[in-house]
Image (tube, rainbow, N blue to C red):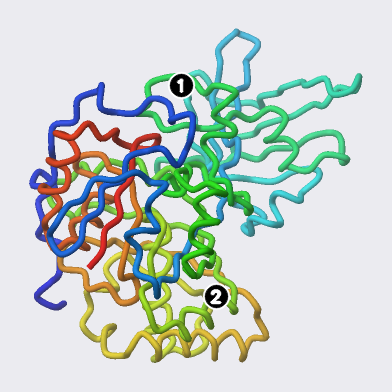
Amino acid sequence: MNNSDPRHIHIKDFTYDLPDNRIAKYPLEERDSSQLLVYKNNQITDSNFISITDFLPSDSLMVFNNTKVIQARMYFQKSTGAQIEIFCLDPYFPHDYNLIFQTTDKCSWHCMIGNLKKWKEGELTKEVIIKGDTLHITAKRIHSAGNTHIVEFSWNDRRFTFADILDICGELPIPPYLNRDTEEKDKATYQTVYSKIKGSVAAPTAGLHFTERVFTNLKDKGIKTDEVTLHVGAGTFKPVKSDTINDHEMHSEFISVRKETIEHLLSHQGNIIAVGTTSVRTLESLFYIGAGLETNPNPEHLKVDQWQPYDSSQNLITKDKALRNILDYLAENSLKVLLADTQIIIAPGYEFKIVTGIVTNFHQPQSTLLLLVSAFVKGDWKTIYNHALTHDYRFLSYGDSSLLLR
């Protein structure tokens, strides 16, 4: 490991006092009217999000995460009256997101279960009346997998896919720190305007500020845009409970990047601005996927491990070479889309390989997202967060935004 290995970092050094009244419980009526903190060359400027194009370098390529939040939380009631909450995290079988949403009879998911002690055995059933027909949905716990459980869902009407099932009887899982129930309007406000690919259980919230008006401004300035997909898992809210980062296990997330996007990243000679920490993790993971292909050009499965970036042998090639390795891999396997999993942790000591700017909200104390911000601003996160706290910025998912530039 190199000298910038962050495993020794103490999470208590990344805390700050966040009063509950600074957490935005609801979004603003107009997404792009939120405040924007711009950080560049150790200087802070206050602005509004609608003006973000004024601060973006003209040679920027902005990369967005086009994932769509699914209504992943379902409730079943036992004959005893006990309510069981099942929270779908990621596919078990079929393992592929596209395939599992298209299933028409049964499928299995990794799930978290609320009120588990009341569901020791047996199946749970739920009935939903749709246009006069009764849809029977059954949930059966197969086995446990650490803190999660494998749950098999089945239903009696093949006209409905599992995507339909979630749309019909699932609930959008808004962040737990909002301390309120999901409301009907969250179905719209907790999605980005460019969301397309179903799979996330949490929104890539930096993107919530973008509107068609902002996209028009980007186009008028000649700012290029592209998209990647990272399906955000519930682990994004997982607090770091260990004293040092070494003992914190990062959650694994699914990423999907089109060949054309990788070609775009390779040919683009200017700044690459990641919209949200999920886009940051996806883009930086591309480098380490390419680095892995340098020594193993035909792996069984593409994955970035948590500590891979801090292995000095993984940092010997250039960004361009890493991206070319991916393109060679796709060509060799006749693939148009790169599919992989990433467990990357970005913390102080990390050297950014692809991203030169970040659009992001203000994150929870002692979170891996705050570690990522600190890594990008070379440890100057307290200056930024103290400014935000003393200038009435709103925090967390529905809060205000920042633009961090080198």
Q: Nearer the viewer, residue 206 or 198?
A: 206
Q: How far apart are marks 2 and 1 (CA)?
A: 46 Å
Q: Which of 366 and 263 is in front in this view?
A: 263
View extreme (top): residue: 81
Residue at the spot 44% in from the left edge and 30% down from the top edge:
27
In this orientation, which residue lies closer to the viewer: 299 or 210? 210
Q: Would you name the residue on which mark 2 appears? A: 261
Q: Is mark 2 on a helix, strand or loop?
A: helix
Q: Give the percent coordinates (x, y) of residue 161.
A: 78, 43
Task: Mark 1: give few (<14), some (14-19) or many (20+) Cα within 10 Å.
Answer: few
Image position of 310 with respect to 397: above or below: below
The x and y percentages for residue 240 are 23, 44
Report whether 112 appears left or right of 124.
Answer: left
Q: Which amino acid does label 1 sit on?
A: Lys
Examine the rendered structure and indicate whether residue 275 appears above or below residue 394.
below
> Which residue occupies 53% across, 64% down?
219
Q: For the point 38% across and 25% down, which residue is it?
A: 25
Would you call the spot at circle 2 few (<14 residues within 10 Å), some (14-19), or many (20 or more)?
some
